[in-house]
Image (spheres, rainbow, N blue to C red):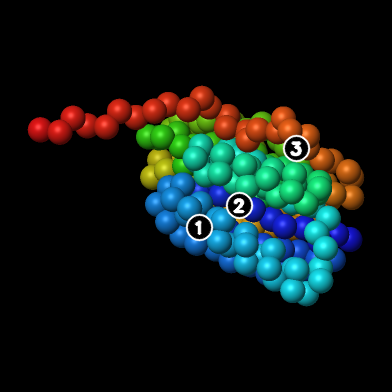
Amino acid sequence: MACILHIETSTNVCSVAVSENGQCIFEQQEHGEKGAGAERLGSMVDEALSFTDNHAIPFDAVSVSCGPGSYTGLRIGVSMAKGICYGRDLKLIAVPTLKLLCVPVLLREVIKEDNALLCPMLDARRMEVYAALYDRSLKEVRPIGADVVTEDTYKEYLDERPIYFFGNGAKKCMEVINHPNAHYIDGIEPLAKWMQPLAEKRFLDEQFEDVAYFVPFYLKDFVAIKPKKLL
């Protein structure tokens, strides 16, 4: 087992956690507007580092939620993680954000059907969501994509088995997808405290990133929005 610092900044919720031997021993989170929560990241990381230093707990690695999600948030989170890895000579672990969203759903044990699919969703622009489909063992059934939500977006899968939609993008589906196999779970956020099982597995498998060259998984190119002209 390892001691890992976890950083999550993909949405409006910025969070930091520390896990040791498979248990979360420190956790903080901050809500803000999209990407704004990451402004508090530095102070939360400082508190996490002080906590472990005061308890003489050495870190083995830093895990960071790698996307997709907020461009600004992901850049800030990955930059912070890389800086800590450089400064403390630690391993860097990337945790896919959509898989991270699945962790609290599986821990709640709300899904009973063996053939059910999980569809984590993050809000993108307009009627778009970042989404993927996984089975209950988190095996990828359909890769991550930027989906325009319509009533037929997931019909080929919904016709065959139940799908559980969750994450801050699922609200868009609730408005247009009324299939009897469509189920919705509220209150699921990508938080650092849920990163432990995914990061721990990557640590044991020695699935580390190159600190010098690692970049977030943005999925789509950044598009700047021009401010409205003042009247």
The spot of residue 142 in percent (x, y) is 67, 32
Percent of width and height locating residue 135: 72, 44
Question: Please, what is the three-letter code of the amino acid marked with disc 1?
Answer: Arg
At x 37%, y 34%, the residue is 126
* Pointers 2 and 1 in contact (C-beta within 8 Å): no
Quadrant including the N terminus = bottom right
Is the residue 86 above or below the residue 151 in the image?
below
Q: Residue at x 56, y 44 (%)?
A: 76
Provide the residue designation for mark 3.
211
Q: Is residue 186 left or right of residue 52?
A: left
- Cα distance between the residues tagged 2 and 3: 17 Å
Q: Secondary structure at mark 1?
A: helix
Q: Which residue is mark 1?
A: 40
Q: Residue furthest front?
A: 87
Mark drawn on residue 8:
2
Residue sitting at 75 percent across and 44 percent down?
Answer: 86
